[in-house]
Image (cartoon, rainbow, N blue to C red):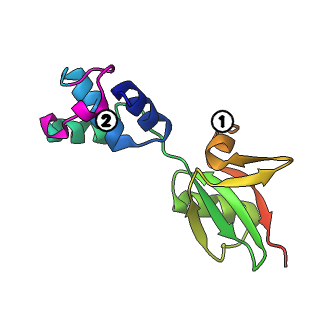
């Protein structure tokens, strides 16, 4: 794998720390996009500068996760939100009650939709504003 592929993946999968480290090492010309990832030496990075890059979010990450909020023993609502707190707030405003619990799922979790499957990561691309209700799930049985 080359640095360019790793950098792209770190952006796609929202690996903020890795992306900012690679950004810094590229800017300082310690690595190039064409290098094999075996050439990456994170000890060459100025860790204080990278911490500032992450703090200032120079790459513009806006983490949105997927949360499952339990209505009752069989019903759940999935909400895309920046935090558990934000998901609970949207749930409470929408359903006028507090959820029984709230758990974050992996964006790579796949579920059936229609005749196919979709990951929450791909589903998130269908939304323009967050927080947003992604859908509901009813447990059978």
Which of the two marks, 2 or 1, is nearer to us in this view? Answer: 2
Q: Is residue 26 above or below residue 116?
A: above
State yes or no: residue 42 in magenta: yes
**Residue at position x 19%, y 39% in the image:** 42
Residue 59 placed where, x, y %?
38, 31
Whether residue 72 sits left or right of residue 82 in the image: it is: right
Q: Residues within 10 Å of mark 2 (few under 14, many from 20)?
A: many
Please tell me in which quadrant of the rendered image residue 34 appears: top left
Q: Which mark is residue 128?
A: 1
Q: Which residue is at 56% across, 56% downward?
A: 106
Distance CA(mark 2)–CA(mark 1): 25 Å
Q: Relative to residue 5, is residue 102 drawn left or right?
A: right
Q: Residue at label 2?
A: 20
Sequence order check: which comes first, mark 2 or mark 1?
A: 2
Q: Secondary structure at mark 1?
A: loop
Verify whether residue 130 appears in magenta. no
Quadrant where the image shows the N terminus: top left
Look at 45% across and 41% down and name the residue there. 14
Looking at the image, residue 56 sits to the left or right of residue 14; the answer is: left
Q: Main secondary structure of the magenta part?
A: loop
10 Å neighbourhood of mark 1: few (<14), some, or many (≥20)? few
- Residue 20 occupies which quadrant of the picture? top left
Q: Which mark is residue 58?
A: none
Which picture quadrant has residue 127?
A: top right
**In the rendered view, would you say 68 is above or below 47?**
below
Where in the figure is residue 101, as x and y percent of width and height?
61, 74
What is the magenta range? 31-45
The image position of residue 64, as x and y in percent, is 54, 47
The foreground one among 99 and 13 is: 13
């Amino acid at each position: 794998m080359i640095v360019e592929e790793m950098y792209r993946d770190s952006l796609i999968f929202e690996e903020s720390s890795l992306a900012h480290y690679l950004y810094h090492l590229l800017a300082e010309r310690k690595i190039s996009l064409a290098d094999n990832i075996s050439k990456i030496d994170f000890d060459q990075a100025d860790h204080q500068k990278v911490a500032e890059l992450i703090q200032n979010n120079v790459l513009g990450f806006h983490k949105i996760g997927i949360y499952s909020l339990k209505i009752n023993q069989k019903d759940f609502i999935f909400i895309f939100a920046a935090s558990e707190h934000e998901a609970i707030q949207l749930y409470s405003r929408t359903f006028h009650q507090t959820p029984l619990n709230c758990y974050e799922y992996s964006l790579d979790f796949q579920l059936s939709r229609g005749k196919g499957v979709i990951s929450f990561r791909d589903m998130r691309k269908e939304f323009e504003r967050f927080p947003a209700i992604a859908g509901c799930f009813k447990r059978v049985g």
